Image (cartoon, grey):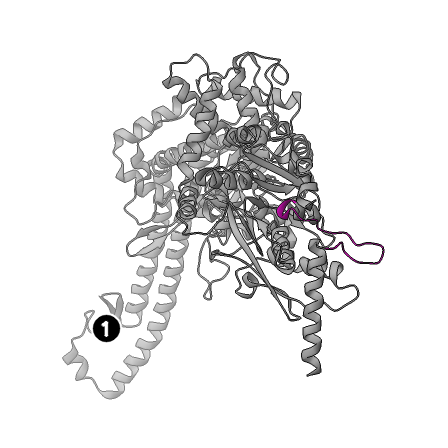
Amino acid sequence: MDYADKINIDKYKVPTERLKKICMTDDELNFCGSSKEVNFPKGVIGQDRAVKAMEFGLSMNAAGYNIFILGHQGTGKSTYAQSVVNNEAAKGKIPGDWCYINNFNEWDKPLAITLPAGQGKIFQKDMEKLIANLAVYIPKAFEGSNFQQQKETIVQKVSEKMASILRDIEKMAITAGFGIQQAGTKILLIPLKDNRLITPDEYNQLPVDTKEKIEINRNKLAKEIDDRIREGQVLQRISEEQTTELEKQTAHAAAEPLINQLKEKYKEIPAIVDYLDKVLKDAAENHSIFSSVHHMVNDEVATEAQEETETADEDEDMLFDGRFFESKDIKDPFVRYKVNLFVNNEKATGAPVIIESNPYYYNLFGKIEYKSLMMTTMTDFTMIKAGALQRANGGYLILQAKDLLMDPYAWDALKKALKYKQAVVENIGEQTRFVPTVTLKPQPIPLDVKVILVGSYMYYYLLSSDEDFKKLFKVNVDFDVEMDRNQENIRQYVSFIGSVCEKQHLKHFNNRALARVVEMGSRLAENQNKLSTRFNVVSEIVYESSALAEADNSEFVDAYHVDKAIKNKKYRSNMLEEKMQEQILNKKVLIDTEGAVVGQVNGLSVMDASGYAFGIPSRITARTYTGRQGIINIERETQMSGNIHSKGVLTLNGYLGGKFAQEKQFGLTAQVTFEQLYGGVEGDSASSAELYAILSSLSNVPIKQNLAVTGSVNQMGEIQPIGGVNEKIEGFFDICSIKGLTGNQGVIIPESNVDNLMLKDEVVEAVVKDVFHIYAVKTIEEGLELLTDVEAGEKGVYGDYPMDSIFYLADQKLSEYNRILANNADK
């Protein structure tokens, strides 16, 4: 009897009930009739580990306990982060406002001060009112009779002393025989004759010795007069200083009551009290700026401002004409007294939560703005602008890791801020300039913020290579892509669907439709006992199913609406898949689904095109011949093989050596390749198929082409699980369906992948009708029996394989190769 008659292939068949785990409405969904009957979910679904990690991270106030939320796209990371952080922040303390004020000692180093939330804006307006009042009261003080009398007294005293000095100079000159004549700023001493000034002609006619005496007397008198003139200049300078001091005192006296009111109001904030003292001193010293602006404003506006100031309550906003702040100078003279409200928390109800969707450097860390004037640029402390980091101070800052790393400066600046707990406002490039430039260096603000980064595993591992990352982000919140398919999680699934329908005003789902979504969740998770937590994909199906139900005027979304939505979604994405199937059908790509061929097997792979994954068969061939090069992987030799695929092929050497080279050398050269594959190959899921092709070539036993194979193999010949099993099965099924189902076609998968099966209904129906088959194997030997209907062979007590088994035939071929190699060596 032929071995094929003895082999029982049915024992490898996967039972139809294990091809897909159907959601039974009277079992798993017995708690509701529709999504309308369930309560909304609380918190995040199926992420217990992540929730506990997040709670821990938010509760830790120690340095470095910032949070990185990582996971695959669509698991709800960002939505969860916003929700839980907002809830936590609502219980937090409202941080104070921050203002930048002028540093009168060092203008380029503005000072930062903090006030209770909402007080920053009040302080800013108080300073604006103070400027307006000073522009009224200081000029009026100079117009007052008291100031004028004191100033006139100073001037009069100096005038009298100067007149006395001039009289003395005149007497000195007359006594010495000279008269005085002024020529501009100079005093000329001219000799007298008969009490009159002599003429130049008369002077020239004088004897030489007389002239000499006159010049001696003139020089002596000139020195005495210079001494008296210097005395007058000193008096003049003292008078000017007295006038200046009087003006300062007058301005000080006018400004002091106004500033004292503010000092009393802000007496609990020493930094403001100190600042106001400096404002008083500076206003007294620079009183002229108020006088010049006062003359630019008409009396009506000034009077109105004065009257409003006198009658306005201390806490009320004073209305004043904007012209108080206009100046014909390039720079506003009153900027020095203004307040830059840097961070305003007046509307906060808890700790701030800032979600920066565009975290480039200036959006994150603030900036110093410049404006262009007269072919140059200028800035001042009022042009310092806050970034997300400063606005989040005292609370939470949520960022997407991908967006953060797009800016070449942002990550290093963020690390520095967290490490030193300071929010520094500094424009890019200030630390790297070859030639230092004069610019502002605002006082850093103490930083107390918890940063939450959200990103994929790739960005987490990328940042992990930075030694500072682990010190600064000690908490990782890992979002899983799947959860157990149990009653509680199914209830949560249905609750999620119900909440989406309710919030978005969609059609609710009946039990049959809910069952389909649950099954889709297991399909996405690629596990019958799991549900996917990629709720963005679930939401898309909910939206599209509801739209179909709306078009049908159905009260509820039914199962066929969900099925149609899934098919429509696939149709929008599977053009490449259909093109490749068309290539196979037209024999542009050679794939056999019937017959048997030596050294040729149908392997299965998964392709991903813009997020849509599909399975496609590939022809794998092997040729064996004499040599000692072992297995030659053509893809690797042409640099089209990934590392994992190359490892899988090299593993085959171990298996073959263990089977056939225990007592002799392994005299084999085998070439393996994926035919008509030009885009490269990665993964080891085809390693079992490659081994089948090599063994077929060695034994000269043909492999059935009506079967396709997937599964990786280890050196012991055990078949290991692979990914994408559903797509691979459906890919070969679709090709067989296009070419025509013959009744004996099927797919061989690893036995350990059976619980990953969530096949589409068409495949399940074909298996039920016995026109397509799914086989599961644990070893290479089992797979060989299915593919060849020939016994693989097991060594007997004498170390020989059974006659005509595949291993016997392969061993004979290898022995022949060794003889040929030995003969060639002897020659």
Q: Amino acid at mark 1?
A: Ile
Identify the image quadrant of residue 745.
top right
Highlighted range, magenta: 786-803
Which residue is depicted at the point 34% across and 35% down? Answer: 140
Q: Quadrant of the N terminus?
A: top right
Of 404 and 277, nearer the camera is 404
Per the picture, the main secondary structure of the magenta-coloured stretch is loop
Q: Position of residue 728 (x, y in %)?
A: 55, 42
Q: Quadrant of the C terminus?
A: bottom right
Label 1 packing within 10 angstroms: few (<14), some (14-19), many (20+): many
Of 93 and 47, nearer the camera is 47
Which residue is depicted at the point 28% across and 80% down? Answer: 214
Q: Position of residue 414 (x, y in %)?
A: 56, 48
351 with respect to 108 (left or right): right
Q: Which residue is mark 1?
A: 190
Identify the image quadrant of residue 671.
bottom right
Residue closest to the far bottom: 208
27 with respect to 287 (left or right): right
Of 278 and 795, nearer the camera is 795
Residue closest to the far left: 201
Residue closest to the far right: 797
Q: Position of residue 479 (x, y in %)?
A: 62, 36
Can residue 105 be seen here? The reply is no
Instruction: Give yes or no for residue 551 being in the magenta stretch.
Output: no
Of 713 and 424, nearer the camera is 713
243 with respect to 478 (left or right): left
159 with respect to 729 (left or right): left
Q: Helix, strand, or loop for circle 1?
A: strand
Q: How many marks?
A: 1
Q: Position of residue 321 (x, y in %)?
A: 30, 31
Can residue 619 be seen here? The reply is yes
